[in-house]
Amino acid sequence: MDEVVQLRSVRRVFGSGSGAVTALDGVTAAFPAGSFTAVMGPSGSGKSTFLQCAAGLDRPTEGEVVVAGVELGRLSETALTRLRRDRIGFVFQAFNLVSSLTAEQNVGLPLRLAGRRPKADEVRAVLAGVGLADRARHRPGELSGGQQQRVAIARALVTRPAVLFADEPTGALDTATSRDVLRMLRGLADERRQTIIMVTHDPVAASYADRVVFLADGRLAGELAGATPEQVSAHVTGLEARAC
Ligand SMILES: Nc1ncnc2c1ncn2[C@@H]1O[C@H](COP(=O)(O)OP(=O)(O)OP(=O)(O)O)[C@@H](O)[C@H]1O
Ligand SMILES: [Mg+2]
């Protein structure tokens, strides 16, 4: 099928015995090529655990994760690291750029780590794609928060990953800057068919996605397609009320 990411009955239990915490409790979900999905839910509902398992940064206790046709559970640590490097992009709330490197050096880093010498044109093209062609020689400290996040997104995209994961990518940005980053993500999905899975607390951010998937207590708790911020908000409020 045309599914880039699939989770099948994924459980993730932290700890053991009476102190065990079930962060994911049997999650089955599929994400088609070119789709832009937001993941929402109350604090502690398992969103970050979901993203980490789907991106091969954490291994489920039970169940399967398939990315770009490869079942992650069957891979050795080395093979998993390679697949993550080549096929998966990850963007964090805190940007995680290397402060001593310029924007273009940061973007070229994943290629260097893969043992390739980044071509200047290739890196410049990705920076231009996030609207930062004129900031290639700037260091993170010389860029605004939104520009830093766009460099981080360019860095995640330079390997042409099958899927881009983002955990609260606009969590550290003001409203106007968030909207720039969200419009850019929307553009990547529309124009390049980039598959995107984004965790967010912000109903407006979620409304940029095609689909919003909700988690509560480690389980799927509904989904909305083409939802307005108000509809997303109402669903979240319902889940939070249930959690109290
Ligand atoms: N390494 C860990 N060890 C033990 N428990 C953990 C660990 N990581 C997460 N948990 C627990 O698993 C549950 C889900 O955590 P997770 O971080 O996925 O939630 P979240 O939905 O991302 O929350 P938030 O919105 O606050 O970021 C929580 O109860 C958390 O305490
Ligand atoms: Mg989280």
Image: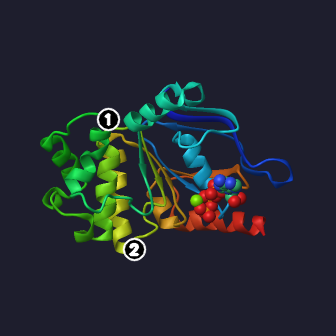
Residue at 48% x, 66% y: name it. 204
Left or right for 219, reference 125: right
Residue type marked 1: Ala
Tell me if mark 2 has few (under 14), some (14-19) or many (20+) residues whose alpha carbon lies within 10 angstroms of its own. few
Q: Where residue 151 sits in the image (x, y, percent)?
A: 28, 57
Secondary structure under tag 1 reads loop
Mark 2 lies on residue: 175
Residue 119 visible in the shown view: yes
Q: Which badge, 2 or 1, comes first in the chain's sequence? A: 1
Residue at 16% x, 39% y: name it. 119
Question: Do the CB atoms of the residues marked 2 and 1 lie less than 8 Å apart?
Answer: no
Q: Where residue 53 sits in the image (x, y, percent)?
A: 58, 42
The image shows residue 23, relative to residue 180, as above or below, that is above
Which of discs 2 and 1 lies nearer the camera? The answer is 1
* Residue reaching furthest to the right: 18
Quarter-of-image position of residue 113 = top left
